[in-house]
Structure formats: structure tokens, C-alpha cells
Image (tube, helix red, strand yellow):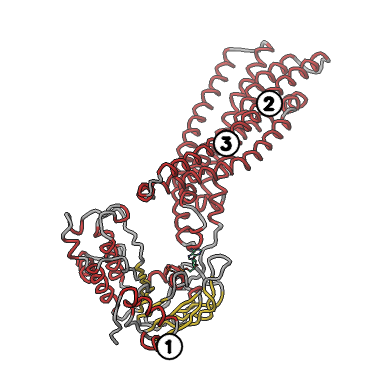
Amino acid sequence: MNLIAGKYHNRMVRVTLISIFEAILGAVPFVVLYFLLCNIIDHTFTLQKLQVYIGFIAGSAVFRMLFSYLSVTVSRADGTLMVKDLRLRLGEHIRKLPLGFFSSHDTGELSNKTLDHVNKVEQIITMLLPEFISTLVLSILVATGLFFIDYRMALATVITMPLALGLLVWAKKIMHVRGKALYESSSALANSIIEFVNGIKFIKSFNNSHQKMDDLVGKMDDFKKRSLKVEGILSPVMTLSGISIDFGLVMLILMGASFMAGGSLSGKTFIVFVIISSRFFENLKSLSINYVKIRYLLIAGQTIQSLFNEKQLTGNKTNVDLSKQDIVFDDVSFGYNKTRVLKSINVTIPHGSMTALVGPSGSGKSTMANLIARFYDVNNGSICIGNNKLEDVDPEKILQEISMVFQKVVLFKDTIYNNLRIGKQHASREEVIDAAKRANCHEFITKLPDGYDTMVDENGGNLSGGEQLRLSIARAMLKDAPIVLLDEATSSLDPENEFFIQEAISNLLGNRTVVVIAHRLKTIKNADKIIVLSNGEICEEGTHRSLLKKQGLYHKMWQTQESTVGWKITN
Ligand SMILES: Nc1ncnc2c1ncn2[C@@H]1O[C@H](COP(=O)(O)OP(=O)(O)OP(=O)(O)O)[C@@H](O)[C@H]1O
């Protein structure tokens, strides 16, 4: 709970104290009721006493209302602050997790944890916990009072408690197992809904909507089944626990009657016990229901905690200069899982150069780029930029120094202008336009209905693939980072778009260190260095000419591409 409450931990103590005061005030009517009953039975009741009792009850009611108001407002306000802080901390934590975490966790699961589960924690903090504490303290106070009046009768009152407690422990266990499964089912359902909505275009294009809808209905059925299972088992247990609490009243009456028959209990004490205990039992029942609710919602807290337990990338060096430095792979091995994808990579990517990564599909080109951006940490060896081992550097610092142009461009539902400014948050309009011009975007942007203020549809639906790619290059220009990772993706473009993009890429080069993941060798013919990967190992490196001379894999790939497209080698 400490991790979840964060810096608002003390505020939880404040809410607890207010609830305790509220409970103490709640005990006043019980005490007054006790004296009133004694007076009535003893025939000592007077109007004066009645006025005092009414004064006490009214006074305690006013204070209780005040505390109750305080408890609600303070717990709501604190709860809202706490939940806001929790969401921010959770977001911040998730942001710093390695990319591998996201491949092994569904979007639905993550959105469920950050939205729904956090709401459940809020429900515990703002509503259930104050009420639970207040009822618990009140029950303890009343039980203590009853013990002072007559310990035998008090024992009779609580004699069925172990049974009720045992049932509650059982309910807790059921909650833990079935509740967890219910949460998992709800995450799976959320994930399917997100997948369905995001992929609707593809689903429709493959005429697959019925099958996907069936999957979705299946998940809904599973969720319904699990909910019913939880309810179906929990309801009888809770009812049984309620009955066992009520049974305490029967025990009380039976034992009271036997004590009275034996002459060791007065009729007055007997009546006091019967009346006060019936209120006491109601309290116990609400306590047990709240306990089960809290236990159920706490599973949400545990899932949030497990997210906090995920290991972030280490490294806190921020005061380092990563510009004008070589990138050095020293005996690097890496695998996303147990299978090794990169094996003993030793290579230097010289600063200010254009270095191309080439090789068959699946040979590890993108993986090498992922490691430079430190989306993952290496398993063996090290990657250094200058003298700085990446593992020691703050991951955010690394990302500040790197621009990335991926095949799959992410555009947000916002204006073109704001989409470009993601490269540099505080860029002026002039800077944005200048970058757009250098990335060959300006012309097509100015032809759009609202120019730079045109709204981009979600995922850039109203822009062509080539236009999206050029916007992505403009972003990188604006960011002006010393290292550029570029996934060359011009193969699917028409010649005009390809020309514009090649020109934009040339403008991006400058004196930056550019690492290009190349799919077509023609585009990287003039690279300063070409690294040829095969099956996770470097099999050749050099310039285009030297590699052709070697007559190795590069030569073979070049010939294959040449014969496919019909190019002529001009050197
Ligand atoms: N997130 C991931 N989790 C598990 N395995 C992965 C992941 N990403 C890539 N791989 C595997 O790692 C290997 C190398 O993939 P990588 O994307 O680096 O190759 P590539 O040379 O860039 O391929 P391509 O040219 O097709 O893009 C492949 O076998 C791939 O299946």
C-alpha cells in the first residue's frame, strides 16, 4: 500500500484518524442508550435526565456529521490527489521500462491497470477504507463496553465470531484465486476490444469481422462466466457468515435466559445486551461485507504493485557528450528471449559517417538499431558511444541524442504543425516550416485545406505513405540530434515519392552519424561503411566497392537485386 499511496502516505493516516474519531462519536448513542434503558428499568428516569441524554445525542450527532463530512471530503480530496499521483508515477515508470516489457504485455492489460485498476484503488481509499475503519473501531469500542457490563454475556455475544471469521478467511481465499482470474479475463476482454477497434480496417478488408466478433463474444462470455462463478461461490459464503453473526443473538438470548434462571443476571442487563447487540451485529455484517469488497479490490492494487516491480533500465549518467563520438559494439550478444539474435558483434560505427546495415530478412539489422537506442540492454559485451557505456547512461539522455525514422510512422490525431513539433516541443513556426522544406514536405502541406493547421487523421489516414515518411524525416530534422537511426523504407513507394524521400534523407545527413537499415542496396551504395549481417553475425564490412570485390554475401545480394530490378552498376 505504501508504494501505491506514495508521498500521500501521511494523508492516509489523517483519513484513518478522522474515521476513528467518527467511530468514537458513533459510540455515544450506544452509551446513552445503555443509561436510558437502565433508568427506564430501574424507574429512575426523569425529564432532566432525558434532556441530558438528548443533549449528548444531539451534540454527538452534530460532531459526527462534522467528522463524517470531513472524512468524506478529506478522503475524496486525498484519494483524488493520491490517484492522480499514482497514475503519474505509473506512467513515468512504464515510460522507463525496456521495450521487451511491452512485447510481453498486452495493451488491454496495461490500459486496464492504469485506468480501471487505479479507479478501484481510489474506491478503496476514498470510500471503503474510511467506512471500514470507522465500523471496525466502533465495533471494538462497543464490544469492550459490553465486556465491562458483563463479560459472560459479552462472550456469548461474540461466541459465533470465530465461525464468521473462518468463513471470511475462506471468502478471502476464494476472492484471491477467482478474483485474479476475473481480473485476467477482464484484461483479455479489454485487449480484444482494443485490437478489434484498432484493426477494424484490416479485419474488414479480409472479411474477417464475423470471426473476430465471435472471438470478442467468446471473451465476453468468459468474463460473464467468471463473474458469475465469483458471485455464485461468494454469495452463499457471505450469507452463511451473516447467519453465523445473527446466530450470536440466539446464543446471547439462550445464555442470558440460563444466567437469569440461575439468578446471576439481572433482567436490566439482559435487555440492555439484547438491544445493543442487535445494533452491534448489524455493524459486524457491514464490516464483513466491506472486508470482502476491499480484498477483491486489493487484487487491483496488487496488479499495480507488480507493474511497479518491473525492472526499469538502469543508468543515471546525464552529463555526458554523446555527439561526435563513435558507436562501438564490443563482443555484443543479444536475444529477445532465449534464442540469440545477435552473436559476438564487434564493430565500430564512425561518427559523422553514414553506416548501412544490410543482410537478409531476420539477420538482426533492426535489432542492432534497437540496441543503439537502448530499447533493450545487451546480454553480453557492451555498446559504447565514445567512452560512455550505454548501460551507465540515462536512457532518456540517449533518446535525446538520437532521431529515429521508422518504416511505420506514428502520427497523432492533431494538426500537421503539432505532429511535426514532436521533434522539438518549443520550435518556432519558422523552424517547423524550415524543417518541412528540407524534408520535402512544405509543398504538399501548403496544398492541404488548412496548410500546417490541417488535422491529421488517426495514424495518418488522410496522408499517403510517402507523405507520412517525409513528415517523419522533418521531425528528425527539427530534433537535430547528432545520431540518426533510419529504417530505409522506400521500396514500396512510387518513383516520385522515392526521389523526394532520398533527397530529404540526403538533407538529413549533414555531419551526423547516420545508421541506415537498408533493404535496397542501391540506396546505400555511397555509404561510408556497409555492415553485412547474416544470421546475427557480421560476415563482411567495408565500402560498396570493397564488398563487391570480395565476392561474398554482399556481392550475391547486389547481383540478385540487380537482376530483379534490372539496374546497371555504374562504377
Ligand atoms: N520483439 C521481438 N521479440 C522476439 N523476437 C524478435 C523481436 N523482434 C525481432 N525478433 C526476432 O529477431 C530476429 C532478428 O530480427 P530483426 O528485426 O532484427 O531482423 P532484420 O534483419 O531487421 O529483419 P527485416 O529485414 O525483415 O526487418 C528475427 O528472427 C526476429 O524474428
Q: Helix, strand or loop at disc 1?
A: helix
Q: Amino acid at mark 3?
A: Lys
Q: Which residue is mark 2?
A: 245
Question: Is label 3 or label 1 in front?
Answer: 1
Q: Quadrant of residue 497?
A: bottom left
Q: Helix, strand or loop at disc 3?
A: helix
Q: Amino acid at mark 2?
A: Ile
Disc on the earlier residue, 3 or 2:
2
> Residue at 69% across / 12% down in the picture?
42
Q: Quadrant of residue 406?
A: bottom left
Q: Which residue is mark 1?
A: 550
Question: Is label 2 or label 1 in front?
Answer: 1
| Image position of 435 with respect to 20: above or below | below
| Image position of 243 with respect to 18: above or below | above
Using the numbered discs, state the Cα–Cα distance from disc 2 to disc 1 in whole angstroms: 88 Å
| Nearer to us in this view, 194 or 118 | 194
Q: Which residue is mark 3?
A: 293
Mark 3 closeness class: few <14, some 14–19, many ≥20 residues within 10 Å:
some
| Image position of 356 with respect to 151: above or below | below
Q: Is residue 496 visible?
A: yes
Disc on the earlier residue, 3 or 1:
3
| Nearer to us in this view, 417 or 243 | 417
